[in-house]
Image: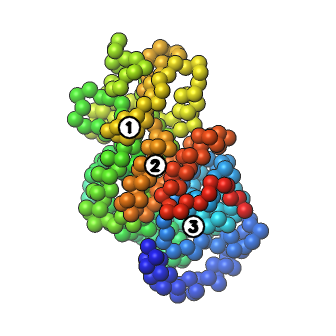
Amino acid sequence: MRLISFLFSIVVFVAVVSSSSSSSSSSSLGCPCESSYLCEPLQIAPRQEFLGFSLNSTQYQNYYWNQLTTLAIFYDTIEDELLCIAHENGVRLVWGTTFPIENLGSSSYIDEWIQEQIEKVQSTFTDGLNFDVESPITDPNIAQQYTDLVAATNKAFKSINPFYQITIDVAWSPSCIDKRCYDYAGLAEASDFLIAMDYDERSQVFGEKVCTAGANSSPSNALAGINNFTALGINTDQLVMGLPWYGYIYKSCLNGDEAGLETVVCEIESVPFRGANCSDAAGSEYDYSYLIQLLQDQTINSSAVQWNTEWQSPYFNYIDPVTGDVDQVWFDNPQSLSIKVQLAQKLNLRGVAVWNIDFLDFSDQYNSRPMWDALASFFPQPASSEQSLN
């Protein structure tokens, strides 16, 4: 990594020098921070990553900024203070974005779209884009068009500032998950890195005669997915492991009279998804903070947290107070997350990411802080979990 960073710095030095004066003058106009340098795109060479996806514009004061490296924003506007805090702590702000695949063949639409993204990033003093396209693509020609879009976007951004960051969210495996048959090797080459979403792994379940509940994010699937990426020639340094701070509640186990708090295998309704008869669409997503509250609710009859050794994931059952049925919950906790983070370390991945960073109750430090620390343990010498807002 040090060699990569050194070579990167040499390659971009001339571009940085030539663009710094014009960038500084434009960034100072309308800068909301006390120091105008905080409105400059961060000039940081490739590094290990802890990327957080954010859907809530009001939670940023609760983040552990000394652990994050990139924040991907999935809302319309950002607070001025967020920009200043992020850049002061060396954290990139990138905009989550998607693209209508029906327009991938329109060069005029693409040119206009790229220019709009550039203007958005420059006007908000932010640091790049995070592509989150999850539409089914089975036509290789369309897949190539998506790769071309990313490559053109990256080229346009890097021509303005070589430190702008362009990343892509991809399925946990390149094996046409959810019919996303993308050109993964091409996407890796066309971007700074890929975030493998190692969650929603049961979006398509094949080979089960009876649909059952199961782990949202298992280390075995994560490993298989990473191996599939590297088999395409994608370097592990181009891969970030995305992990969940949420889980699934599967309502009303269909085990009949055998269903109870000690139920291990919960039979669920068959809900087809993109060609698979069984899917996690039979359940509903809930954030970690809600699941902890559910588990701790003394008015609800629930089991203790159980551990599935095959999937290395926690689960528990409870009696629905309204229906009286047995519901099963699969989720991730600090223990299961740490196992996957250790796997990311062992595989020499670029880093880790979390969907999403706002799924914790920040007033409950007892339960929220270990979730942060589990992700931050990716780094050889993780920083203290004291919040840094300076």
> Circle 1: is it few (<14), some (14-19), or many (20+) Cα within 10 Å?
many
Q: Which residue is mark 2?
A: 338
Residue 187 seen by the camera: no
Mark 3 or mark 2: name the one nearer the start of the chain.
3
Quarter of the figure with residue 228: bottom left
- Tag nearer the camera, 2 or 1: 2
| Residue 232: percent from left, percent from top | 26, 63
Give the amino acid type for the residue marked by disc 2 in the picture. Ser
Q: Quadrant of residue 234?
A: bottom left
At 66% across and 55% down in the image, what residue appears? 386
Q: Is residue 365 left or right of residue 118?
A: right
Instruction: Please give the residue where the numbered disc 1 appears in the rendered image.
Output: 215
Disc sitting over residue 127 in the figure: 3
Query: Where, by quadrant of the figure, is residue 44 drawn?
Result: bottom right
Dot 3: what SS?
loop
Furthest residue toward top: 257
The CA distance from mark 1 to mark 3 is 35 Å
Q: Is there CB contact under 8 Å for labels 1 and 3? A: no
Q: Where residue 299 sits: x, y (%)?
A: 59, 18
Number of callouts: 3
Q: Position of residue 15 (x, y in %)?
A: 53, 84
Disc with the residue nearer the chain's start (1 vs 3) = 3
* Kind of residue at badge 1: Ala
Instruction: State the residue lying farthest toward the right.
Output: 34
What amino acid is at disc 3?
Answer: Asp
Q: Secondary structure at mark 1?
A: loop
For the N terminus, the quadrant is bottom left
Q: Image height check: is 316 above or below 301?
A: below
Residue 268 drawn at (x, y percent): 35, 25
